[in-house]
Image (cartoon, helix red, strand yellow):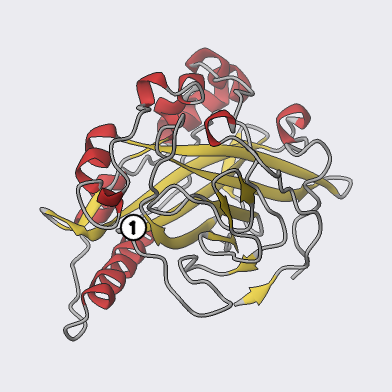
Amino acid sequence: MKTKPVRNLIVKNEIAEDNDDAPVGRVLNRREVLALFGFAGASLLAACTVVSPATNAESATAVAVGSDATAQATTAAEVATVAAVNTVSAPSCVVRPEMTEGPYFVDGQMERSDIRTEPTNGSVKEGIPLTLAFAVSQISDSTCAPLAGATIDVWHCDALGVYSDVTDRSFDTTGQTWLRGYQVTDDKGLAHFTTIYPGWYAGRAVHIHFKIRTTVTGNETYEFTSQFFFDDSLSDQVFTLAPYNTKGQRNTLNSNDNIYGGGGDQMTLYLTPVKSGDAGSGYATTFEIALDLSDSDTGKSDSAGQGGRPPTR
């Protein structure tokens, strides 16, 4: 694991959890997407291979590692991720809505794939394993190609709704960096993370934050920030398991989350269990997204100028 240079720490002190986000951006409809590509782009959209996350993960097989249940789930989830990533044969030209960064982004995190570990003591966050693969492409001159060298930050709360490295009215986790990290896309535009299914906190549906940054013409930084959501019925199932079941009943579903209303249906992760019928074995998914790097409005900083450039490796 490599530590990314610390730049600007976007930390909000004493923040109410139920007021952590406000909608930004908008959703492109089909006509606008086709207009973005032009006539040639319409043919491209039809030709691009759209790979179903469910189909990707169905080929994964759970792998037992001794008698350690955590190791079994982790290894099986990693196998599922490899299977999912390897089946993405072509970039999908899927334009997604940008959403708010929220107050819990902290820049300067570690470059690592498994973000469950707390580096200061080696402890691993408890929760249902989740392997999340990104397939990032770029739209340019009516073509769609993999975007290599893009930095993807991921951060989210733990099973009990707590974020690391911030101070809130109900917790202080400064100095801890679990469930935070970044990866850089390879030549195929792929990157993957091993994490846990997130918990919940008052006022928000279950979600994961992510930010994609890359450098465009003129050495300018293009930044795309959004959030993932989860199927409510699946969350209900997961939250019956430990350690999620110690928190009680959540009060916000996708239907009454003000951020989800800004295009959350396009940002919902469709997960497949690593082991059919066993939620505790973990889940895997691949999320495909295309960025128009010529769109300077979307690509501007989402941290009021405090986001910084992608890390120098």
Question: How far from the left and from the top, in percent, is residue 154?
Answer: 55, 53
Point out residue 111 in the picture as x, y percentages from the top left corner. 62, 68
The percent position of residue 70, horizontal first and vertical second, equals 27, 73
Residue at 44 percent across and 24 percent down: it is 257
Q: 266 and 6: which one is in front?
A: 6
62 to the left or right of 197: left
Is 205 left, or right, of 52 in this rendering? right
Q: Quadrant of the C terminus?
A: bottom right
Would you identify the image quadrant in which residue 301 lies?
A: top right
Residue 209 sits above or below residue 141 on the image: below
Q: Secondary structure at mark 1?
A: helix
The residue tagged 1 is 84
Depth order, front residue of 101/63: 101
The N terminus is located in which quarter? Answer: bottom right
Q: Residue at x 18, y 69 (%)?
A: 62
Residue 305: percent from left, percent from top: 84, 40
Which residue in the rendered view is the most extreme toward the front?
A: 170
Above or below, 237 relative to 44: below
Q: Residue furthest right?
A: 218
Q: Amino acid at mark 1?
A: Ala
User: Is 75 located above or below residue 115 in the figure?
Assistant: below
